[in-house]
């Protein structure tokens, strides 16, 4: 009985991971001179264990986690106890070298992020923005433009790190724009679930 219960719980956990979806955010697709629409979509929603993937298609841009109060400063520079995601600068060579960067969402916290090249002009975005909070995406964008890329203080922020197990890819996108490697990761996880469940019940 205990073994079956353990197997069921393990299968449920693995199944939730296997069903995780891929959330793709295109970077630079609307043109390199339009900071306010650099990230498409600028606001995305992801569940725990989902993978957020930034697909860099035009220009030289980045996706760096920050805080609502200091939109254009890496989160670890504001609070050293946090380790946020940071893609580094991705140069697409005028669209001929499309690359991607991804991380796993480990909780439901709002994840604010910015592009180092265009943050002061509104090149920012958010994952799991709480629409009922006063910390909105529009407010985040206004902060970035008002502060012109500078920090406010070293005080801790309410934004939390994703505690991400970030991985970076240099995979050229397939014809439909979705990186092949990311899709294979999801397929590989599904196979892992089936193998793990079979070993537990036998």
Image (cartoon, grey):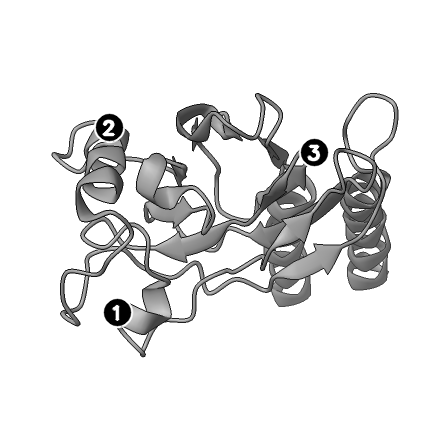
Quarter of image, res 162 = bottom left
Q: Nearer the viewer, residue 133 or 61?
A: 61
Quick check: 145 left or right of 111? left
Please provide percent x and percent y for residue 98.
77, 39
Foreground disc of the pair 3, 2: 3
Disc 1 crowd, CA 10 A, few/some/many (<14, 14-19, 20+):
many
> Exactly how many numbered labels are in the figure?
3
- Residue drawn at (32%, 43%) of the image: 120
Q: Earlier in the sequence, mark 2 or mark 1?
A: 1
Residue at 47% in and 55% down: 106
Q: Are marks 3 and 2 in contact (CB under 8 Å)?
A: no
Residue denoted by label 2: 138
Whole-angstrom CA distance, mark 2 to mark 1, is 21 Å
Where residue 176 sits in the image (x, y, percent)? 82, 21
Can you give x and y, in whole percent of width and height, for residue 188 in the image? 84, 49
Q: Is residue 39 left or right of residue 183?
A: left
Residue indicated by mark 3? 57
Q: Which residue is mark 1?
A: 78
Which residue is found at the position 39% from the left and 27% from the top? 36
Element type at mark 3: loop
């Amino acid at each position: 009985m205990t073994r079956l219960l353990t197997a069921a719980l393990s299968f449920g956990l693995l199944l939730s991971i296997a069903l995780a979806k891929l959330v793709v955010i295109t970077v630079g697709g609307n043109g390199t001179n339009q900071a306010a629409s650099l990230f498409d979509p600028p606001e995305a929603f992801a569940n725990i264990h989902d993978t957020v993937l930034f697909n860099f298609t035009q220009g030289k841009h980045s996706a760096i986690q920050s805080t609502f109060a200091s939109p254009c400063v890496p989160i670890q520079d504001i609070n050293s106890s946090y380790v946020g995601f940071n893609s580094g600068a991705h140069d697409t060579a005028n669209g001929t070298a499309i690359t991607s960067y991804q991380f796993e969402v480990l909780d439901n916290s709002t994840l604010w992020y910015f592009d180092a090249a265009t943050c002061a002009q509104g090149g920012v975005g958010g994952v799991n923005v709480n629409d009922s909070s006063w910390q909105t995406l529009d407010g985040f964008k206004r902060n970035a433009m008002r502060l012109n890329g500078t920090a406010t203080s070293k005080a801790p922020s309410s934004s939390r790190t994703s505690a991400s197990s970030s991985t970076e890819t240099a995979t050229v996108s397939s014809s439909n724009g979705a990186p092949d490697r990311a899709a294979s990761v999801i397929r590989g996880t599904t196979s892992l679930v089936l193998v793990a469940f079979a070993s537990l019940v036998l």
